Amino acid sequence: MRKIIAALNMTVDGICDHTAGLPDEEIHDHYTDLLGQGDAILYGRTTYELMEYWRQFLEKPSEERSMNNFAVAIDRIPKIVFSRTIKEVDWASARVATRDLKDEILALKQELGKDIFVGSRSLIVQLLNLGLIDEFQLCIYPMLEGKGLRFFDEIKERIIFKLAKTRIFKSGAMLMYYQPEKG
């Protein structure tokens, strides 16, 4: 059975807006490697549209190798988009989900293959509330953003995690790998 892995960046004050944080070469390299280990990544409409930003680096690479490599990785991995407003997408490696989130996740978990990543705050919150996250990778940037989208506002009840491992980046960002305790 494949695992559903939620991966999210946020600041110390809980802001997970895609404009918050300070990703550097080491963090881009980490996420490039991570994407190579999965079979798909799930996005909500808003995050999917934000991730389309990376398509420009395929046609006109930047001067930063890590950003170009991340762009290639995000282009390659199949993307499943959950949206009530868009019915089709034009990114060749993306598709719009045809089932509701819970049914899609349960079906994906049963298929053979590599793990499935979730990269949208809204989907991560919904899946945490449904008890369908198998691993939670939380990267915390050493900064206070002060304003923006807060991650944990919509969690419905207590969820206890077991810390599996950590990684500290040179920038001071800390990646924590958690597994929800089943109980």
Image: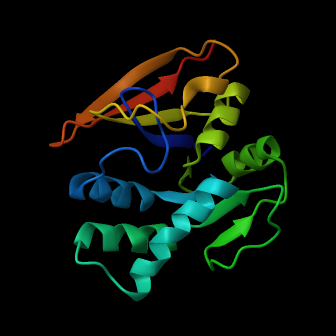
Name the side, left or right, on which 147 lies relative to 50: left
Name the side, left or right, on which 141 lies relative to 73: left
**Whether residue 147 is situated above or below residue 42 in the rendered picture:** above
**Whether residue 95 is situated above or below residue 103 in the rendered picture:** below
Residue 157 position in % (x across, y down): 67, 14
Residue 109 position in % (x across, y down): 67, 46
Question: Would residue 113 be seen by someone viewing this image from the given angle?
Answer: yes
Name the side, left or right, on which 4 lies relative to 45: left
Quick one: 172 or 150, which is closer to the camera? 150
Residue 68 position in % (x across, y down): 33, 74
**Whether residue 61 is situated above or below residue 10 in the rendered picture:** below
Task: Give the total number of marks visible in the rendering.
Answer: 0
**Quadrant of image for the N terminus:** top right
> To which quarter of the image does residue 25 belong?
bottom left
Residue 83 position in % (x across, y down): 77, 56
Name the side, left or right, on which 100 lies relative to 92: right
